[in-house]
Amino acid sequence: MNVFEKLKHVRIVRSVIYVIVGAVTYPGLVLVNSLRIEGTEHLKNLPRRNVLLVSNHQTYFADVITFIHILCAVKWRKENRLGVPYYLLNPFTNVYFVAAEETMNGSWISRLFKMAGALTVKRTWRSDGTEIRRGLDPSDTRKINRALERSWVITFPQGTTKPFAPGRKGTGYIIKNNRPVVIPVVINGFWRAFNKKGLVFKKKGSLLSVKFKAPLEIDYSLSAEAIVEQVMDAIEQSKKFMLMGKHHMIRAIDK
């Protein structure tokens, strides 16, 4: 483990990074755009470890930065709102997030954010969505397993910002093997407000929505593939929701 890997496990280092990143990004989430939060009651009274937040993905960084803001606010007993960001004075650092290694090494900003708790994994797919190999690399899986043993983890099962992309089987294996509390999260509006990296505004005044759902009830005797299907349905990225989206679009055009 190199020095930078060690530093991201030091609470004070991560707290400082959260303050810097939080202060810089807060205006873009709350002042330049509008943030609607639902379901933070489902985050209360959860265990300190083995909690997995699974979400759809729309930008590389804005999504997870918003989650960190919300988790910090919840720590200060705020419900479904951020309010004044004094929560950054004592942020919630008991969380890691899964990110593609290539993404986190792309710029100095991403390298800094990497120290805030990124669990970097090697991509198992190409940019067109086709798989290079089956599942996560064993070393990447161990990395996520170890993080769940002591904290919460945020992951994006699709591994891409493309809507309705299939979920990766690696998420199913992680859930099946660790049996965490799984909190589904549904986000929207980030693709409209920010560029793909989530650092540049595309359209100001956008509505950003983040909805936390109740913990999933999972039958761990099911296959990893079946568990992923349940997760994808919960984060509204399954084929059912894709067909519903197309149906609503056709009705809107007909009108």
Image: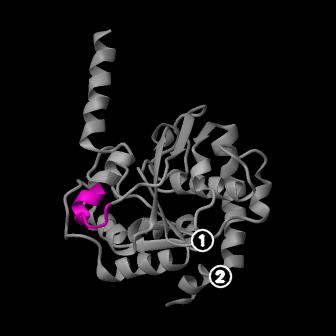
Q: Which residue is nearer to you in this view: 17 or 46?
A: 46
Residue 209 visible at all: yes
Q: Is residue 220 magenta?
A: yes
Scheme of image coloration: one colour
Q: Is residue 232 magenta?
A: no
Percent coordinates x, y for residue 138 in the rendering: 30, 81
Residue 235 drawn above or below residue 14: above
Q: Earlier in the sequence, mark 2 or mark 1?
A: 2
Which residue corresponds to mark 2? 10
At 50% from the left and 42% from the top, the residue drawn is 190
Percent coordinates x, y for residue 41 in the rendering: 61, 49
At 57% from the left and 88% from the top, the residue drawn is 3
* Circle 1 Cα neighbour tier, 10 Å, few/some/many (<14 / 14–19 / ≥20): few
Asked which secondary structure carries label 1, the reply is: loop
Q: Quadrant of the C terminus?
A: top left
What's the amino acid at mark 1?
A: Arg
Percent coordinates x, y for residue 253 in the rendering: 30, 15
Span of residues in magenta: 219-228
What's the amino acid at mark 2?
A: Val
Asked which secondary structure carries label 2, the reply is: loop
Q: Which residue is nearer to you in this view: 245 or 229?
A: 229
- Residue 69 as seen in the image, left or right of residue 192: right
Which residue corresponds to mark 1? 48
- Residue 1 as seen in the image, left or right of residue 159: right
Q: Which residue is nearer to you in this view: 176 or 203?
A: 176
Q: Which mark is residue 58?
A: none
| Mark 2 or 1: the one toward you | 1
Residue 125 visible at all: no
Q: CA distance from mark 2 to mark 1?
A: 17 Å
Percent coordinates x, y for residue 203 in the rendering: 54, 34
Residue 207 drawn above or below residue 227: above
* Circle 2 Cα neighbour tier, 10 Å, few/some/many (<14 / 14–19 / ≥20): some
